[in-house]
Image: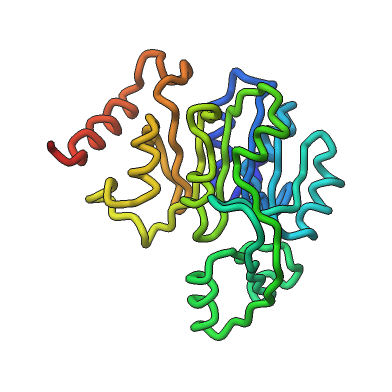
Amino acid sequence: MKPHYSHFGEDVLLDFVFKDQDNGFYVDVGAYHPVLFSNTKLLYDRGWKGINIDPNIKSIEIFKEIRPRDINLNIAVSDQEGELDYYKFLEIDEAGGGSGNSLSEEVKNKYESQGLTAQVSRVEVKQLTTIFDKYLHNKTIDLLNVDVEGFDLRVLKSNDWNRYKPRIIAIEIWINEIDFDNLFGNSIYQYLLSLGYKAFSCLLDTWFFYDTAYPLFQRKETTNQKILESFISKMRPKK
């Protein structure tokens, strides 16, 4: 059996989606760890490479050791550049790896209401477009993975979608923030739909979207894909 590393099997799904592609490129925002809970480790082992981004210096130091083929950046991502407060919760992750760390004041307040204490530091913030301008060099982004604890939509809005359009997006949408009877009521879902993406799967808190222009999904539809498309079309608000 092939090993997997992600939290809920996300990398198994991505390994299947990209089963015919051994030399892809990913961008992992909120990368956390090069092995533990990683959605990109399995792809890296197959020969892929990419950009890992995390505001936690300890995480990036580990990435530099274990993922030397990747570009590893110790910064945060948002729709406005500059500096922001970064909230670290050692009670969640004693090693300081960052599984619960966030730029979101709302997330900080939620954890503090549960009795946790935040360590606060200032971190450099860049837009995705700025990062892509510097590092992509005309590469196609096969996978954009985003998991930044409440700042995910701001990460998406920091990209110039006319210039940089990933083929597949895996993004965290907390299960308590999406209504399966009203998918279009979720801001991330609606935003990606407006950019020409469609959802094709979800695993608990991780949702997967594909660019409708991506030829991987131009092939003959499977029965499951037809069922999903039919369900989504029924949920779309009528004009």
Colouring style: rainbow
Say if 70 sits above or below 100 in the image.
Answer: above
Q: Quadrant of the N terminus?
A: top right
The one of 1 and 105 positioned closer to us in this rendering: 105
Residue 1 seen anywhere in this rendered image of the structure: no
Task: Say left or right for 226 vs 220.
Answer: left
Question: In the current view of this chain or complex, which residue is farthest to the bottom?
Answer: 115
Residue at x 66% of width, y 28% of height:
25
Task: Say left or right for 6 vs 211.
Answer: right
Please provide percent x and percent y for residue 114.
51, 82
Please provide percent x and percent y for residue 174.
43, 58
Say if 13 sits above or below 180 in the image.
Answer: above
Residue at x 50% of width, y 60% of height:
150
Question: In the current view of this chain or complex, which residue is farthest to the left?
Answer: 239
The one of 219 and 127 positioned closer to us in this rendering: 127
Q: Quadrant of residue 4?
A: top right
The one of 208 and 13 positioned closer to us in this rendering: 208
Q: How many marks?
A: 0
Residue at x 60% of width, y 28% of height:
141
Task: Say left or right for 69 vs 171.
Answer: right
Residue at x 44% of width, y 27% of height:
211
Residue 162 seen anywhere in this rendered image of the structure: yes
Please provide percent x and percent y for residue 144.
57, 37
Please provide percent x and percent y for residue 81.
62, 52
Q: In which quarter of the image is the C terminus?
A: top left
